[in-house]
Image: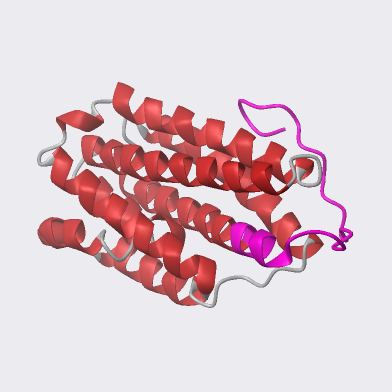
Amino acid sequence: VPAGGAALRPCSTRVALEGINKPVVDRIIRVDHAGEFGANRIYAGQMAILGRSSVGPIIQQMWNQEKDHLKKFNELMVAYRVRPTVLLPFWNVAGFVLGEFVGLQMCKLSVLLQIVCAHVFGTTITGAGSALLGKKGAMACTVAVEESISDHYNNQIRTLVEEDPEKYKELLQVIKQFRDDEREHHDIGLEHDAEATPAYSVLKTAIQLGCKAAIFLSERI
């Protein structure tokens, strides 16, 4: 059962595709799968740096929820026969390498790299890079990303409701629950002094610009 929410029914391996707006559903599931994959890489990077610190258990708790999210979108990818973004393997490898080996002297550069290496692309540089800025930096990253993703989920909810809320009932349930989880992560970040991060506004803006660019690209390719 996903933490903090009601149980979601396991998705059957096949879904009746007749009558659904396949391009819209494909775009939603593709980008959300990429986003949850990205979230897992972000928290993996943060845990690599801060796993033994006082915020380690909090980061692990949020990561566990993101693992549940990714598992569900993996099921939906199969059920709705959606291909993943072609950018997924590239950003996975690039993010892991950059995230694990970036040095402390690269912290300032990592802020700039947030613009192109944010949540949806699955880059550990966002997680580890922000963690190198300290506990507050990691929480600032969480706030920025989760705020962007919550807004993104809300846009998807509006789209599906306009299409047909009954037809997309299961997908709406998933997205609404995951949006609530992301809001919880956002609030946890604020509770742990995210706004006290040096240059918080700059960091947040950079990450959110990256999120918008990443969402745009992952929906389409």
- Quadrant of residue 174 within the rendered picture: top right
Is residue 132 in view from this perspective?
no
Q: Position of residue 13 (x, y in %)?
A: 86, 59
Residue drawn at x 54%, y 78% is: 86
Quadrant showing the N terminus? top right
**In-image side of 182 versus 73 (left or right):** left
Question: In the image shown, does 169 or 190 lie closer to the viewer?
Answer: 169
Q: Is residue 70 above or below residue 165?
A: below
Residue 4 is left or right of residue 39, and the answer is: right
Q: Is residue 85 visible?
A: yes
Residue beneath the point at 63% across and 42% down: 175
**Secondary structure mostly seen in the magenta stretch:** loop
Q: Is residue 92 left or right of residue 10?
A: left
Q: Position of residue 177 (x, y in %)?
A: 63, 34
From what the image shows, is residue 42 above or below residue 188?
below
Quarter occupied by residue 77:
bottom right
Q: Which residues are magenta?
A: 1-29
Residue at 49% x, 67% y: name it: 218
Is residue 48 located in the magenta-colored stretch of the structure? no
